[in-house]
Amino acid sequence: MTTAKRGPGAYERAYECAYEHAYDRDRLRRFLSGEAVGEGLSRRGVLRFLGAVTGLAVTGTGAGIATAASATAESATAASAAAESAAADPRAPGIIKPLPAELLTVRGTNAETNWAALRGTGYHTPVDRFFVRNHTATPVLDPARWRLTVWGSGLRGGAVEFSYADLRALPAVTSSACLECAGNGRSYFTTQQGDRVTGTPWTMGAVGAARWRGARLSDVLRLAGLSPRAVDVMPRGLDAAFVAEGTDHGRVRRPMPVAKALDDVLLAYEMNGRPLVPDHGRPVRLVVPSWAGVASIKWVGDIEVSDRPLFSPWNTVFYRLFGPAHPRGGSAPLTRQPVRSAFELAPGAVFAAGRGHRLTGRSWSGHGGIRRVEVSTDGGGTWRQARLHDAPHPGGWVRWSTTWHPRGTGPAHLLARATDTSGNTQPARSVPNEQGYFFDAVVRHAVEVV
Ligand SMILES: Nc1nc2c(c(=O)[nH]1)N[C@H]1C(S)=C(S)[C@@H](COP(=O)(O)O)O[C@H]1N2
Ligand SMILES: [Mo]
C-alpha cells in the first residue's frame, strides 16, 4: 500500500499541500475577493498555495531530459499534423489520429470512445476508437532518437540511459489490460445526481482494453541499479508542460510506490500487435494495470527513482478526493479504479416494441475480475443476471449480454450493475467529490421504445 510506504510526516505534508490546492478557480477567486470567509483556507494559506505551486513546477531535473521548450516545439508539429488530417472529422487540438464522429466524441483536448462503436469489436478496443486523454498535445517523437533516463537517489549509482533498441532487447511481456481515466463517467455526477464537479465531462467512454507488449519496468529498474532504499518511482512524459488557470504544473508525472513499479507495470511499445501510435504514447508509455489512467504516463522520457516519497500535482492537487464526504485535506492519492459498466449503445438508442433485442455491454474493476452482472430494463425495479462471455481477469473487462422484449412504447432506462471478485458492487449513488473522480454508480441509460 502507498500509505505503508510513506512516513506520517510526509503524508501530513502531502495533505497540507493538497488541501491548499483543493479549491477550484471559482472558490479561489471568491476567497481572494473576501467572499469565502469560514471556508477553512486562510489568506496565509493562499500565499503558501501560490508558493507551493511554484515549488512543484520546478522539481525533478535530471541529465538527458528534453527541455520544456523542445517538447513545445514537438507539440507544435503535432498540432499542425492534426490540422491537416481528415478535414471532415471533428478535431481536437493536439490529437493526431482521425476522430470520426461515429467512433469518438471530442471533449476539449481529449476524445472519448462511443460505446455503440464497441459492439461486435472483440475483446480489445481497436486503436481507431480508443479514447485519448491529453493534458496538452501529442508530441511526435522519433524512436531512433528517443532515450529513457532513469535517475535519482533510489539508484545505487548515477543516471542510466536506455534506447528504444535497448528496451526491445529485454524480455518482452504481453498483457491484456484496461486503461481508464479516473474521471470516466464524471458527467453523471451532474446529470444523474445533480452534483457540481469540475473537469472533462466524460460519459463512460474514457476506457479501453488493449493487448500491450513491452519490457517490464522491474527489469529496467534492476538494470538501472535499483537500491533497496528506493521508495517511489516517478515517470515523466515528454509532452509540453501542463499549464492550467495560470499555473505551470510542469510536465505530466506521477509517483507510484516501488512495490507497484516492481509488480505488473510495463514500458509498452506495442498496442494490439502494432507499434504504439503517437496519440497513445509512441515510442514508449507506461501501462499500470488496474490503476487510474494518469499513472500510465505516455511518451515517457525519464523516471525518477527516489529514496524519499515524491510528490507532483498529479498526486496532490489532482487525483485525490476532496469534499464534505472525504477526509479534511483530501483522500489518499487514487490508485485502483472502481467497478463500472456500460451498454454498447448510443445514448437515446431506439428499440422496436414487441420483439426481442440482444443487449450487450462490458464491466470492469481495478479490484479484480468481474464475477456477476445484473441488468434491469424497468428502471431498477427488477434485475436479472446477464450472461458473461469472458472469464474474470484482473485488470481486464468482461463482455456480457442479455435479451430484452420491450412491450410498451415510450422512454425507458436500461441499468447494468456489476460485482467484482473482491465483492464490490456498483451502488445506486456515487459519493461526490469536487473533481468528479471515480463515478461508480449504476448508470441509467436512457432509450426509447417505439
Ligand atoms: N505524458 C502524458 N501521459 C499521460 C497523459 C498526458 O496527458 N501526458 N494523460 C494521462 C491520463 S489522465 C490518462 S487517462 C491516460 C490516457 O491514455 P490514452 O490517451 O492512451 O487513452 O494517459 C495518461 N498519461
Ligand atoms: Mo485520466
Image (cartoon, rainbow, N blue to C red):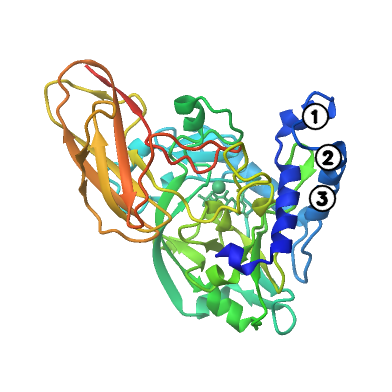
Residue that appears at 75% across and 52% down: 250
- Image quarter of the N terminus: bottom right
Q: Amino acid at mark 3?
A: Ala
Amino acid bearing label 2:
Val
User: What's the mark number on residue 52?
Assistant: 3
User: Mark 1 touching mark 2, by CB under 8 A?
Assistant: yes
Residue 88, visible in the rendered structure: no
The verdict on label 2 being within 8 Å of ligand 1 is no
Residue 164: horizontal and vertical position, in percent?
58, 72
**Disc 1 on helix, strand or loop?**
helix
Quarter where residue 12 is shown: bottom right
- The residue indicated by pointer 2 is 46
Q: Position of residue 63 (x, y in %)?
A: 78, 71
Point out residue 200 in the picture as x, y percentages from the top left corner: 57, 36
Q: Nearer the viewer, residue 308 or 91?
A: 308
Judging by the rendered image, the residue that carries numbered circle 1 is 31
Q: Secondary structure at mark 3?
A: helix
| Mark pair 3, 2: CA separation | 10 Å
Viewer-side label of 3, 2: 2
Disc on the earlier residue, 3 or 2:
2
Circle 3 residues within 10 Å: few <14, some 14–19, many ≥20? some
Q: Sort mark 1 into few (<14), some (14-19) or many (20+) by Cα contacts within 10 Å.
A: some
